[in-house]
Amino acid sequence: MTQRFLPLLVFFLLCLAHIATGAETTQNKPPENGGQYGSVEERRLLLALQQERQNLVKEREVLTNQKKDLKRLEAEVDKKLDQLQAMRMQIEQLLAEKDALELKRVRDLSKMYGKMSPDKAARIFSSLSQDLAISILENMKTKAAAKILNNMDRDKAAKLTTAFSTL
């Protein structure tokens, strides 16, 4: 990085030297004395400074274009985030509706099993998944649930009772 600014520093020092001696500065143009430079070194430095200035102008244009691209991308990302947020809200709403529907179905099943004979309900409960059986028992009246558990296999009833107690 310091090598990059070295020609600029040398040019600045040359300008100061010219000002101190009363000479006119040239602002990156060849001298007016027929296009001749005071020395080969001066010509080389001025050409290097011109090249450096052109490079800086190009870099500034590149940075300006990159800033525009970043702003465009930022706007696109914000738009996508808004879309994702809307989709998230929609999914949450659908999940809430699904949970409400499942809860209604479990309550309906609880009513049906509560009206069945405890012996038949116990046989069916033995083949249900543990989570579903617990959900149904949870929504049943205590007396009906107790009768069903009483008619079930002892091990299965114990597992359901243990799982039910840890809800």
Image (cartoon, rainbow, N blue to C red):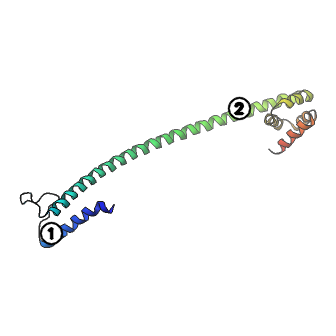
Question: Which of the image's four quarters has the C terminus?
Answer: top right
Place of residue 23 in the rendered image (x, y in percent of width and height, measured from the top left): 11, 68
The residue most toward the left is 34
Place of residue 165 in the rendered image (x, y in percent of width and height, measured from the top left): 84, 44
Question: Residue 18 got which mark?
Answer: 1
Find the distance from the CA under tag 2 to the CA under tag 1. Answer: 89 Å
Badge 2 amino acid: Leu
6, above or below 118, in the image: below
Q: Splitting the image into 4 quarters, where does residue 144 fall?
A: top right
Task: Return the disc, 2 or 1, that comes first in the chain's sequence.
Answer: 1
Mark 2 or mark 1: which is in front?
A: 1
Which residue shows up at 33% across the image and 46% down it? 65
Q: Splitting the image into 4 quarters, where does residue 150 fall?
A: top right
Side of 13 where 110 appears, left or right: right
Q: Residues within 10 Å of mark 2 (few under 14, many from 20)?
A: few
The residue most toward the bottom is 20
Place of residue 33 in the rendered image (x, y in percent of width and height, measured from the top left): 6, 60
Side of 118 where 15 appears, left or right: left
Badge 1 amino acid: His
Residues 39 and 66: in front is: 39
Place of residue 138 in the rendered image (x, y in percent of width and height, measured from the top left): 82, 38
> In what element is the residue under mark 2?
helix
Which residue shows up at 32% across the image and 63% down it? 2
Q: Which residue is mark 2?
A: 101
Q: Residues within 10 Å of mark 1 (few under 14, many from 20)?
A: few
Q: CB of mark 2 within 8 Å of CB of mark 1? A: no
Residues 153 and 122: in front is: 153
119, above or below 155, in the image: above
